[in-house]
RNA sequence: GGCGGCGUAGCUCAGUUGGUUAGAGCACGCGGCUCAUAUCCGCGGAGUCGUAGGUUCGAGUCCUACCGCCGCCA
């Protein structure tokens, strides 16, 4: 009986629509989640995503659109949800931090933490800009004391606020990071995390007076304050699942795997573990950190404005293409260069020429030479000259599920796809070397041609099955062409498709794209 | 300023504990096949492995300095 697992993306701050960078995270988490469902069974996996809708940045974005915060976040959250749906992100939970249940849950956690003694009241002192309605740190200021937005002096103010004891838990968290090698992965980020935790981190201000910001969740122990955005957003990882199962968080935290961007490493390594420990809960299992997508020379982000709409790629190139591209092209954890030209290159080379064409050539031969039916007249043994090719193909295909599992488990999505494509390459070489299209013209050798096509179909079946997490729509289409149901899709080679089995005529899964400049 | 990462063919990148003529894919050139989506198969050209030193019988792989790009921290 395999363990259950809880998988999350970051909770996306929805002051602007999603871009390809946010989609990348959702897609990576989705590939992982789908893989886990295949491995552990559907009921062992929960996959959660959602939108973070409180705070002053969102309120300002709403005002800029002439809308109330709630109306604006209703709209933006729906945009995210629809985008993920269109990209076939198979979330089980889509959480909104403005959902009444979430707000109630955050209040429960605040109350619990307050009663445990890890929240205290003290003066918060800082440099405040009245125009921006926010605090600035000294390094953010222009010419020593000017607000970068309004170019006018900030004020030093002191106000009462509530603080969470972060520093109290720093050493405990640091030890955990040091002791558990795969708590933060890839490893490069683990070292950064240890560096952050080596120095005092101070305590975290988790409140704002309502007089300054009312767009937030009210503190259960002081109605004059709302909680600050980070404290609120983290609990979205568990609020919704805890609605039906109150112990979900304590039970599943050790089996929780978070996917985040490297920009929020600190919050997940310093704040989140302390928030959990202060609430008397265990630490999560893994924090998986991905890199940025570089787009036109700069990190794709809302603030740089170089954003690309992920859904437009889905409509332009068809389902699965964007997710194939980002998983195949980028090493998880490292930054990568995103370009539409590159996407088209990969589409033509990998999807049209390799996957699409191989499918087409094999189905065409079965259809043309054997009326679409896997022939019963198949020879029991390969020709001597073919034996080596056949064994090479079967070895590849046989080992594929284990190798892919190993790679995906370690977040090596790119290598996993490379491995699948190696099997595809071997299959193409096998057909080129054995030439079933020649054999079939010799009545004595039709049985050999049948054998070769059978092996090719079986290879394609396994490949289609292994492709499901990466290309769910394509996988389904392939299995449909092969006329294989989901249950028999992942059987070992030789046990899926049987003589007498009827397959469908070929279709162009990925029509080649002409050389158009992006 | 401190710490860390990166810099390898036109492009995107692999290169394990230092060891024979530095690899892959794409792009490019030539040849072959014809079942297939002008697809597939084979062959080929191309790189002073950021710069300069050093350790070593031998370094892309270790050490030092420098240049460039990027993070994190102060």
Image: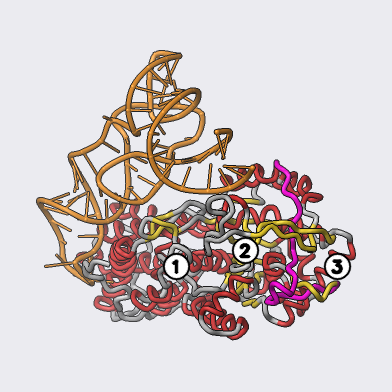
Please tell me the numbered disc located at residue A112.
Answer: 3
Q: Residue at x 31, y 74 (%)?
A: A363
Q: What span is in magenta?
A: A199-221
Q: Is residue A10 left or right of residue A449?
A: right
Spot occupied by residue A285 in the image (x, y as percentages of width and height):
69, 57
On what subunit does the disc labeled 1 rest? A
Distance from the alpha carbon under mark 2 to that under mark 3: 33 Å
Residue underneath mark 1: A20
The image shows residue A245 at horizontal and vertical percentages of 78, 76
Q: CA distance from mark 3 to mark 1?
A: 38 Å
Reading the image, the residue beneath label 2 is A129
Q: CA distance from mark 2 to mark 1?
A: 33 Å
User: In the picture, which quadrant includes the C terminus of chain A?
Assistant: bottom left
Residue A67 painted magenta:
no
Residue A310 figure quarter = bottom left
State which chain disc 3 sits on.
A
Q: Secondary structure at mark 2?
A: strand
Asked if the residue at tag 3 contacts the one at tag 2, i.e. Cβ–Cβ closer than 8 Å, the answer is no
Asked which secondary structure carries label 1, the reply is helix
The tag earlier along the polypeptide, 3 or 1, is: 1
Looking at the image, is mark 2 or mark 3 nearer the viewer? 2
Front residue of A507 and B53: B53
- Camera-nearest label, 2 or 1: 2
Q: Is residue A484 left or right of residue A432?
A: right
């Amino acid at each position: 009986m395999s363990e259950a697992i809880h998988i999350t993306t970051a909770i996306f701050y929805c002051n602007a629509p999603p871009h390809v960078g946010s989609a990348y995270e959702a897609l990576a988490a989705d590939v992982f989640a789908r893989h886990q469902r295949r491995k552990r069974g559907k009921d062992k996996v929960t996959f959660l995503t959602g939108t973070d809708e409180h705070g002053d940045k969102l309120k300002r974005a709403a005002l800029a659109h002439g809308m109330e915060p709630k109306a604006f976040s209703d709209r933006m959250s729906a945009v995210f949800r629809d985008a993920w749906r269109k990209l076939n992100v198979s979330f089980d939970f889509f959480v909104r931090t403005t959902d009444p249940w979430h707000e109630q849950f955050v209040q429960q956690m605040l109350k619990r933490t307050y009663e445990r003694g890890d929240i205290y009241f003290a003066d918060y002192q800082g440099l405040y800009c009245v125009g921006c309605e926010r605090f600035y740190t000294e390094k953010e200021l222009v010419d020593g004391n000017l607000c970068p937005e309004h170019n006018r002096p900030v004020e030093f103010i002191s106000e009462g606020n509530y603080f969470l004891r972060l520093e109290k838990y720093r050493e405990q968290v640091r030890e955990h990071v040091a002791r558990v090698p795969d708590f933060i992965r890839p490893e490069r980020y683990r070292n950064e995390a240890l560096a952050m935790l080596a120095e005092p981190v101070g305590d975290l201000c988790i409140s704002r007076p309502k007089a300054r910001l009312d767009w937030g969740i009210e503190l259960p122990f002081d109605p004059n304050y709302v909680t600050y955005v980070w404290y609120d957003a983290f609990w979205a990882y568990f609020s919704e699942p805890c609605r039906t199962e109150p112990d979900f968080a304590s039970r599943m935290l050790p089996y929780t795997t978070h996917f985040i961007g490297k920009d929020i490493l600190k919050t997940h390594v310093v704040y989140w573990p302390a928030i959990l420990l202060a609430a008397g809960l265990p630490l999560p299992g893994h924090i998986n950190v991905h890199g940025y997508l570089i787009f036109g020379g700069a990190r794709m982000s809302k603030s740089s404005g170089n954003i690309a709409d992920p859904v437009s790629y889905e409509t332009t190139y068809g389902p699965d293409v964007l997710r194939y591209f980002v998983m195949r092209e980028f090493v998880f954890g490292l930054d990568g260069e995103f370009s539409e030209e590159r996407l088209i290159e990969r589409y033509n080379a990998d999807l049209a020429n390799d996957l699409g064409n191989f499918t087409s050539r094999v189905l065409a031969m079965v259809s043309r030479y054997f009326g679409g039916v896997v022939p019963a007249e198949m020879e029991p043994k390969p020709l001597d000259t073919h034996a080596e090719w056949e064994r090479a193909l079967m070895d590849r295909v046989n080992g594929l599920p284990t190798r892919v599992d190993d790679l995906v488990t370690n977040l090596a999505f790119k290598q996993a796809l490379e491995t699948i494509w190696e099997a595809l390459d071997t299959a193409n070489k096998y057909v080129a070397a054995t030439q079933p299209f020649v054999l079939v013209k010799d009545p004595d050798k039709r049985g050999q041609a049948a054998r070769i096509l059978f092996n090719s179909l079986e290879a394609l079946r396994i490949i289609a099955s292994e492709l499901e997490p990466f290309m769910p729509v394509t996988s389904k289409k392939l299995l449909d062409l092969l006329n294989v149901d989901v249950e028999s899709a992942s059987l070992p080679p030789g046990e899926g498709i049987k003589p007498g089995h009827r397959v469908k005529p070929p279709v162009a899964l990925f029509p080649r794209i002409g050389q158009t400049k992006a």
